[in-house]
């Protein structure tokens, strides 16, 4: 009853506001139409919002991280306080370090699991392999690659940045030219963001490796796979990646709080002579503890249980199937965007991301209004446009624990929110195109009988 009252109070607050904006009498609030609520300006809505009321149904989270968490994983994390010095922990943690290799595509790389976010993973990769003043070659084509550059500079590295359009990925021809010109092999590392989460672009790490090998360049290959690893194909061994980084709130479908690294023998060797100061992220402290199944400081045990559950789910699905599922969900979302008559920010199909779709809105439409409508009306979280593309794009995340019907809900909500924002799209067009594609390409879930 209390909740119900709260809900009514929340609604009437919105109605009051809406009426005030339109100069209508407060007493007429009950007659304010749904359409007039659309006029609530973005500048007033947040201060008037009352989040004490929990809407029925479920909250629909389709940002490109944090993502949906599987019920089994959520339950696995509901544990009482546990002591990591008790004997169960060592075999449990050692097995996690081994099994997490699955998502990186490696059979024997050293893995590290830190209580940190993806940003910590960046820091760990740089600090442990490089010395101040070392030269790093990198690309900037979105907010995350920009932030990694910023970190490199703040850590005292000499950074050669290739600025590309937001919506483009790593151009291997340019990479070859730069590496060829580096006759003294001053470049110590090539660092790339595999999946740029601001733009929906996935660069081709395999081709980057081929290009480096083609120029016989010895630089380390450092890859931010924060929004790709665990969902998209990643071949650490085949691509001879030296450091790969991911974060738990992305394709691993866990809450934020773990960053996981895979590290090659070459990077471990470089670590022995690298001089950048490091404390929290020092690989050596981990390496001293790992043989005994221990860690140098208190681990986030519930998240480790979640990681166990997540890895079990991914391996029971089969990692190839995980990658295929991500592709199918992405294809359906792209078909929806096409049917809406909208363009993707990523123009070259070879770079289109299977983790998220970044959709441009027409001139004159503020994409942040679509995102706000989605949350305010449909309990749906979509990704806003960040930085340079703020107001110009919105993002639908389809990485992690999702299926067709879940992504269909995101597409439905996006479609309604675009209509709310006044966009001229045909209702049902996007979701119709996505459903057609998914239905035509569907298959029986393993272990379930065909009808
Ligand atoms: C590609 C990429 N790299 C790095 C990060 C930073 O990760 P975190 O926010 O977990 O520190 C993000 C976050 O969204 C990301 O998408």
Image (spheres, grey):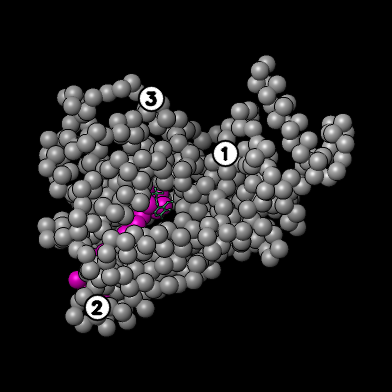
Q: Position of residue 272 (x, y in %)?
A: 11, 57
Q: Is residue 377 above or below residue 237?
A: above
Q: Residue at x 49, y 33 (%)?
A: 449
x, y percentage for residue 130? 21, 62
Sequence-earlier tag: 1 or 2:
1
- Marks 2 and 3, the one that precedes in the sequence: 3
Q: Dot 3 corresponds to which residue? A: 78
In the visual, does 292 lie left or right of 93? Answer: left
Left or right of 438, for residue 273? left
Most common SS among magenta residues: loop
Using residue 232 as the reference point, say whether residue 328 is left or right of it. right
Residue 328 - label: none
Circle nearer the N terminus (3, 1): 1
Q: Is residue 18 visible?
A: yes
Among the 4 quarters of the image, the one containing residue 5: top right
Q: Quadrant of residue 236?
A: bottom left
Q: Is residue 82 magenta?
A: no
Helix, strand or loop at mark 1: strand
Which quarter of the image is occupied by the N terminus?
top right
Residue at x 41% of width, y 52% of height: 227
- Residue located beneath label 2 in the image: 215
For the residues labelled 1 and 2, the Cα–Cα distance comes to 47 Å
Provide the secondary structure element on which disc 3 rests.
loop
Give the CA separation, mark 2 to mark 3.
Answer: 51 Å
- At x 37% / y 78%, what residue is drawn? 174
Residue 229 lies within the magenta run? yes
At mark 2, the secondary structure is: loop
Q: Give the residue drawn at x 20%, y 48%.
A: 279
Q: Is mark 2 within 8 Å of ligand 1?
A: no
Q: Name the residue tied to disc 1.
A: 60
Magenta highlight range: 213-231
Q: Judge depth for marks 2 and 3 and give the one in front.
A: 3
């Amino acid at each position: 009853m209390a909740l119900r009252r709260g809900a009514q109070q929340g609604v009437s607050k919105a109605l009051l506001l809406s009426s005030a904006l339109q100069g209508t009498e407060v007493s007429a609030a009950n007659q304010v139409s749904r359409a007039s609520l659309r006029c609530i300006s973005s500048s007033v809505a947040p201060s008037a919002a009352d989040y004490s009321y929990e809407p029925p149904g479920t909250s629909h989270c389709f940002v490109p991280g944090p993502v949906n968490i599987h019920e089994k994983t959520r339950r696995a994390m509901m544990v009482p306080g546990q002591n990591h010095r008790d004997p169960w922990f060592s075999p449990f943690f050692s097995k996690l370090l081994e099994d997490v290799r699955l998502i990186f595509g490696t059979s024997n790389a050293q893995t590290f699991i830190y209580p940190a976010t993806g940003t910590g993973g960046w820091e760990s990769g740089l600090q442990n392999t490089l010395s101040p003043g070392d030269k790093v070659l990198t690309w900037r084509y979105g907010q995350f690659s920009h932030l990694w550059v910023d970190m490199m500079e703040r850590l005292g590295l000499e950074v050669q940045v290739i600025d590309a359009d937001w919506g483009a990925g790593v151009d291997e021809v340019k990479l070859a030219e730069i590496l060829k010109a580096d006759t003294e092999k001053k470049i110590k590392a090539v660092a790339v963001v595999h999946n740029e989460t601001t733009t929906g672009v996935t660069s081709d790490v395999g081709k980057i490796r081929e290009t480096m090998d083609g120029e016989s360049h010895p630089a380390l290959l450092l890859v931010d796979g924060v929004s790709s690893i665990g969902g998209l194909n990643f071949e650490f061994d085949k691509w001879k990646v030296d450091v790969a980084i991911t974060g738990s709130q992305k394709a691993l479908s866990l809450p934020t709080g773990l960053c996981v690294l895979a590290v090659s023998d070459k990077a471990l060797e470089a670590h022995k002579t690298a001089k950048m100061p490091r404390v929290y992220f020092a690989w050596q402290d981990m390496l001293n503890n790992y043989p005994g199944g221990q860690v140098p400081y208190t681990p986030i045990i519930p998240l480790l249980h979640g990681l166990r559950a997540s890895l079990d789910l991914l391996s029971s699905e089969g990692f190839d199937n995980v990658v295929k599922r991500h592709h199918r969900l992405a294809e359906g979302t792209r078909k929806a965007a096409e049917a809406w008559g909208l363009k993707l920010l990523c123009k070259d199909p070879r770079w289109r991301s299977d983790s998220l779709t970044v959709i441009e809105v027409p001139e004159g439409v503020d994409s942040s209004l679509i995102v706000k409508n989605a949350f305010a009306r449909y309990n749906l979280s979509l990704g806003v446009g960040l930085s340079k593309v703020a107001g110009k794009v919105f993002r639908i995340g389809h990485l992690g624990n999702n299926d067709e019907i879940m992504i269909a809900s995101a597409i439905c909500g996006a479609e309604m929110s675009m209509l709310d924002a006044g966009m001229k799209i045909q209702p049902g067009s996007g979701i119709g195109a996505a459903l057609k594609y998914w239905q035509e390409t569907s298959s029986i879930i393993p272990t379930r009988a065909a009808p």
